[in-house]
Image (tube, rainbow, N blue to C red):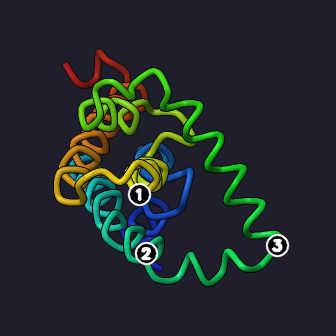
Amino acid sequence: MDSYLYIFLISMIPWIELRGSIPAGVLMNLDFTRVFLISLIGGILIIPFVFVLLDHIFPIIRKINIIDRLYLYWESKVQKRYKKYTEWELIGLMIFVAIPLPGTGAYSGTFLSYLLGLDRKWSFVAISFGVLIAGILVSIISLGIDTIF
């Protein structure tokens, strides 16, 4: 498999996203600019698909007990982490997604937007900017500040 396709696929895995794909690309000694852009695209492309999944497929599969329990667990975790950003709505959503920790990426941000009933277009913009900021932070951590500047 092409190394860049591998990076793209990693960037679309829930809870790993570009937090894993950028360091993987750096470890594989791939062209950093391409790794960053591919990871960013993968992280942003998933947002509309997650909204569609939540709108149309998720209500059906929530009828399965184990999935419903996982959903309720994830819902409580996401809401607990987001609580300190609720006053800021979309800015808070962007900051939440920008934090480069597992569980705060595009999937969780999209899920949170869905739970709170936020405007989809503006949520997409806020989540995308959050993904960009997270990508920059992960890049700085992966490459080291002295390499970037």
Question: Viewed as shown, does residue 143 lie left or right of 59?
Answer: left
Residue in the image at 49% along x and 27% along y: 83
Q: Secondary structure at mark 2?
A: helix
**Extreme residue in the front direction:** 117
Q: CA distance from mark 2 to mark 3?
A: 19 Å
Amino acid type at circle 2 is: Asp
Q: Is residue 128 above or below residue 1?
A: above
Residue 9: % across, % down: 45, 69
Please tell me which of labels 2 and 3 falls first in the chain: 2
Amino acid type at circle 3 is: Asn
Q: Is residue 143 above or below residue 54?
A: above
User: Residues at badges 1 and 3 in contact (C-beta under 8 Å)?
Assistant: no
Residue in the image at 65% along x and 50% along y: 74
Residue at mark 1: 114
Q: Where, by quadrant of the figure, is residue 89 drawn?
A: top left
Residue 75: image tag? none
Residue at mark 2: 55
Residue at mark 3: 65
Please tell me which of labels 1 and 2 falls first in the chain: 2
Q: Secondary structure at mark 3?
A: helix
User: Residues at badges 1 and 2 in contact (C-beta under 8 Å)?
Assistant: yes
Amino acid type at circle 1 is: Tyr
Foreground of the two, 37 or 146:
37
Q: Secondary structure at mark 1?
A: helix
Instruction: Rate crowding at label 1 as few (under 14), some (14 to 19) or many (20 or more) other CA atoms within 10 Å.
Output: some
Instruction: Rate crowding at label 3 as few (under 14), some (14 to 19) or many (20 or more) other CA atoms within 10 Å.
Output: few
Q: Is residue 147 above or below residue 8?
A: above
